[in-house]
Image (cartoon, helix red, strand yellow):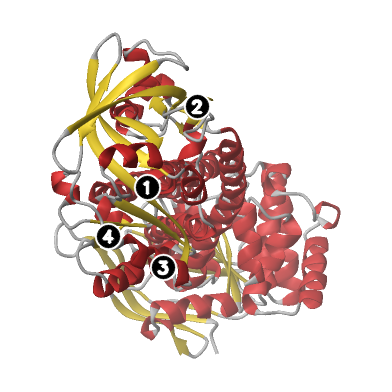
Amino acid sequence: MKILLKIAWRNIWRNKGRSAALLTAIVIGLWAGVVTVGLMTGLLDQRIDNLIDSEIAHLQAHHPEFREEHRPEMVLPDVTKLTTWLDEHQSVRSYTARSIVEGMFQSPVKTSGVRIMGVDPERERNTTTFHENLVSGDYVDADIRNPVILGLELAEEHNIEIGNRIVLTFEQLDGELASAAFNVSGFFRSGSTHYDRGNVIVHIKDIQELLSEKPVFHEIAVVLHDIEEAESVVMAINEQFDGLVAQTWDQLSPELGTIVLLGSFMLFIVTMIIMIALAFGILNTMLMALFERIREIGMLISIGMSRIRVFFMIVLEAVMLTITGAAVGMLFAWGTITLLNREGVDLALFAGGIEEIGWPTVIYPAITLGEFFSITVVVITMTLLATLYPAYKAFRVNPMEVEKDT
Amino acid sequence: MAVIRTEKICKVYNPDTIPVHALKDVSIQVEKGEFTSLVGPSGSGKTTLLNMLGALDMPSSGKSFIGDVEVTKLSDKERINFRLHNIGFVFQHYNLIPVFTARENVSFIMMLQGVAQKELLERADELLESVGLGDRKDARPHELSGGQQQRVAVARALASKPRFILADEPTANLDTKAAMNLLDIMEKMNEEQKVTFVFSTHDQRVIKRARRVVTLVDGAVHSDKTTTPDNTVKE
């Protein structure tokens, strides 16, 4: 074995240019694989986290038809019983109840259709990160009468500044229309311009006063200690409470699940293309190296080196190159991911439009240790597979090749 | 017992298309301590015969023995192992391992044989001394002249303590001085250590020094002349 290691290692460096090219291919292959996975994972994770953390939470409960009809009278029944249950459940970290109505947003400039969401600012802060989207002004607990916060896009469309007054009109529970003036306390940017144009946030007590005589809630968003428990908690709620439906985050936003699946599939395809290109590069280089050394291999077999040793000599050359390349590639990839994760990758220049549909324009690539090592294992495996054919060709060399003129 | 013996070996290339009869019923015997040249014009079959003697190729018919082992009955794997322990090779193009030093090239075959590290290094040094390259043992092939490389090849061939050495046109790429120097070394080993050498050559410098000359013409033995120590020639 020692002798094979020795000859294989020396053989690698007999043509430094070619070995350097092969090493570079392995380093780039691994680096590209890891960074692609990191970018894609970061993009998907951010999209999911953003949606979950800022609004959806891990699960929600509604009137069974509310999500389809959005009628103001479709309120959650017996909310106190549900909140008491949530208070006592060990898996629940926090929750927030919301009142949501569809309505009209009127400014001196024009009128727009919006979704008006009444939130308890204290509970909302403990449950979601939506308050972090505030880019200027104050949240809905501002010390003014009827505060409202708007998306930046909506504010720009209506030429509104903080302190301006707008009118919200919506249907009450009894079917009558209610209108009230609200004072703009701040602007938010959620990451989705579509969302920012169509949503306004108000204090829950302000809207509840207008909706009906007693407090009503249309939605309860719950955050658990562990997102993995969402399904079991949802099942428990649905079993114990009548007149409402609880759903997990992926049921609430099925397109998110599809996107994750599609993203993973695309990631697989891209990674495989990189790996196959790498494998063919290695196959080509190793075959070239082999054909140049065919007489030498003939000599080795002539003087008594067994064919299996010749086979492993070629495989070892590739293994050593791969391990060296993989180590350097892993180092570069880890460094790149760490750096990009800290600085972020700003896609605004290339894909400003993706923000429109809620995707982040600044991606923070992330990769798990498992993914990182999986890619490394794939690169090493592909390299070894690519070496099997040249190694087999070496195994089959006729010893009389030694006598052939070059 | 003869070191090498062939019985009516024939070699036919392309038997199913355009048959080429490279060897025709060749029966020769090489005794221990011989210094023999296989000579003949190009295409006469000397390299083919050398390949048969070295168990690098198998005849289409006939038998070939090394000692009491019928090599024509061995499998490819067995023949490789047999060559490792019984036959030394010197090739026309030297064919040293370019990434190894002279010392490592000589040691390599002993490593394959499983000789202990200390012993193989001592033997490699001794052999390099014996071919006059004691001071060049750390040089790589590209740092050596053609003659020096061929001397390393001779040392390598001897390293495995073979029964005999086959040399295919060993002087073909050497100038006169280097060729004579190499022949001196091989002749000395033959005389002092009774190492058996069989050459294929058409180099007159080698033919003149050989004590037995087997001439091949069209794949058959045309003549077989032995020069005795008193310079009389026997056919």
Mark 3 highlights which residue? A84
In the visual, does A348 lie left or right of A71? right
Tell me which numbered mark, 4 or 1, is placed earlier along the sequence.
4
User: How far apart in space, not on screen, are marks 4 and 2 (Cα)?
Assistant: 36 Å
Q: Residue at x 36, y 40 (%)?
A: A118
| Secondary structure beneath label 1 | helix
What's the residue type where badge 3 is placed? Thr
What's the residue type where badge 2 is placed? Ile
Q: Nearer the viewer, mark 3 or mark 4?
A: 3
User: Is there a contact, CB below 8 Å, between mark 2 and mark 1?
Assistant: no
Neighbour tally class for label 4: few under 14, some 14-19, many 20 plus, Cα within 10 Å? many
Same chain for marks 2 and 1? yes
From this view, report whether residue A32 is shown above or below residue B231. above
Mark 1 highlights which residue? A271
Neighbour tally class for label 1: few under 14, some 14-19, many 20 plus, Cα within 10 Å? many
Q: The residue marked by circle 4 belongs to what chain?
A: A
From this view, report whether residue A340 is shown above or below residue A79. above
Residue A77 percent coordinates (x, y): 25, 60
In the visual, does B148 lie left or right of A331? right
Residue B133 percent coordinates (x, y): 80, 55
Same chain for marks 3 and 4? yes
Mark 4 highlights which residue? A247
| Secondary structure beneath label 4 | strand
Mark 2 highlights which residue? A144
Q: Nearer the viewer, mark 2 or mark 1?
A: 2
Q: Nearer the viewer, residue A299 or B176?
A: A299
Q: The residue marked by circle 2 belongs to what chain?
A: A
Question: Of all residues shown, which one is farthest toward the front?
Answer: A213
Neighbour tally class for label 2: few under 14, some 14-19, many 20 plus, Cα within 10 Å? few
Tell me which numbered mark, 2 or 1, is placed earlier along the sequence.
2
Tell me which numbered mark, 2 or 3, is placed earlier along the sequence.
3
